[in-house]
């Protein structure tokens, strides 16, 4: 599984740690700050019984909402980590950088797609239960954690999705399932995000080859 291989490769490769640590700390700080602000704004004024229910709902909803918004920017934030991973694996690191406007457009498309997947997952929740959330998070994870390697080659969301989703192999499906499950667990998803970027780079190289 490339997801688990990526986490393992990051843990045993000290030269990758600084590239993973800084974005991870920033994301964790934002997670805590935004979570605290959201809870103070919406949950602090409730009565005790309603507050317990709201807190449980918050524990489920906020990690997914944060992941939904934050994952759209993974391709930019974690590009140095993905690039160094490719150097570590050997061979030439292809760089076909996108200009700022196409890159901004790609980020907006990812944000729109992630929002649509989120709405669909919540709509199907009463029917499919947690399966809808896992499938939605898995698809978002597959596209976003592999995005640095694809964007570095000038491949934006549309061509990337076609390369990954047309005749997906066991490596692609297993990555989506594992990354999706990890991404839905509060704090755990943030902790493993750098490792999943490394794993997404492994998967992207595999699919492109």
Image: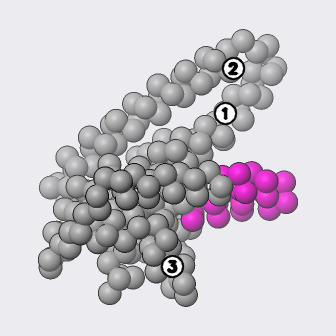
Dot 2 lies on which element? loop
Residue drawn at 41 percent across, 36 percent down: 28
User: How crowded is the residue under tag 1: few (<14 C-alpha within 10 Å), some, or many (20+)?
Assistant: some
Residue drawn at 57 percent across, 53 percent down: 112
Q: Which mark is residue 43?
A: 2
Foreground label between 3 and 2: 3
Q: Is residue 123 within the magenta segment?
A: yes
Examine the image and state in which quarter residue 42 appears: top right
- The location of residue 51, given as percent across then percent down, is 75, 21
* Range covered by the magenta-colored residues: 118-139
- The location of residue 150, given as percent across then percent down, is 35, 70
Q: Which mark is residue 123?
A: none
Dot 1 lies on which element? helix
Residue 185 visible to an observer of this rendering: no
Examine the image and state in which quarter residue 43 appears: top right
Residue on which the image places disc 1: 58
The quarter in which the N terminus is drawn is bottom left
**Horizontal side of residue 133 vs 8, given as left or right:** right
Residue drawn at 47 percent across, 25 percent down: 33
- Label 3 vs label 1: CA separation? 34 Å
Q: Earlier in the sequence, mark 3 or mark 1?
A: 1
Q: Earlier in the sequence, mark 1 or mark 2?
A: 2
Q: Is residue 130 within the magenta segment?
A: yes
- Label 3 vs label 2: CA separation? 42 Å
**Horizontal side of residue 34 vs 51, given as left or right:** left
Q: Earlier in the sequence, mark 3 or mark 2?
A: 2
**Residue 59 against residue 41 in the figure, above or below:** below
Residue on which the image places disc 3: 162
- Label 1 vs label 2: CA separation? 9 Å
Magenta stretch, main secondary structure class: helix
Residue 16 visible to an observer of this rendering: yes
- The location of residue 38, given as percent across then percent down, is 59, 24
């Amino acid at each position: 599984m490339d997801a688990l291989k990526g986490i393992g490769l990051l843990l045993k490769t000290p030269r990758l740690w600084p590239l993973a640590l800084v974005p991870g700390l920033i994301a964790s700080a934002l997670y805590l700050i935004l979570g605290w602000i959201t809870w103070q704004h919406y949950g602090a004024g409730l009565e005790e019984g309603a507050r317990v229910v709201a807190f449980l709902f918050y524990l489920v909803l906020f990690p997914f909402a944060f992941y939904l918004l934050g994952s759209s920017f993974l391709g930019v934030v974690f590009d140095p980590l993905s690039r160094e991973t490719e150097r570590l694996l050997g061979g030439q690191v292809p760089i076909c950088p996108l200009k700022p406007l196409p890159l901004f457009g790609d980020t907006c498309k990812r944000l729109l797609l992630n929002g649509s997947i989120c709405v669909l997952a919540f709509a199907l929740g009463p029917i499919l239960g947690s399966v809808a959330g896992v499938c939605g998070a898995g698809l978002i994870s597959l596209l976003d954690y592999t995005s640095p390697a694809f964007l570095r080659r000038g491949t934006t969301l549309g061509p990337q999705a076609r390369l990954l989703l047309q005749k997906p192999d066991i490596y692609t499906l297993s990555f989506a399932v594992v990354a999706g499950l990890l991404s839905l667990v509060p704090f755990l998803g943030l902790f493993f995000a750098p490792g999943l970027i490394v794993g997404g780079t492994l998967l992207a190289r595999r699919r492109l080859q």
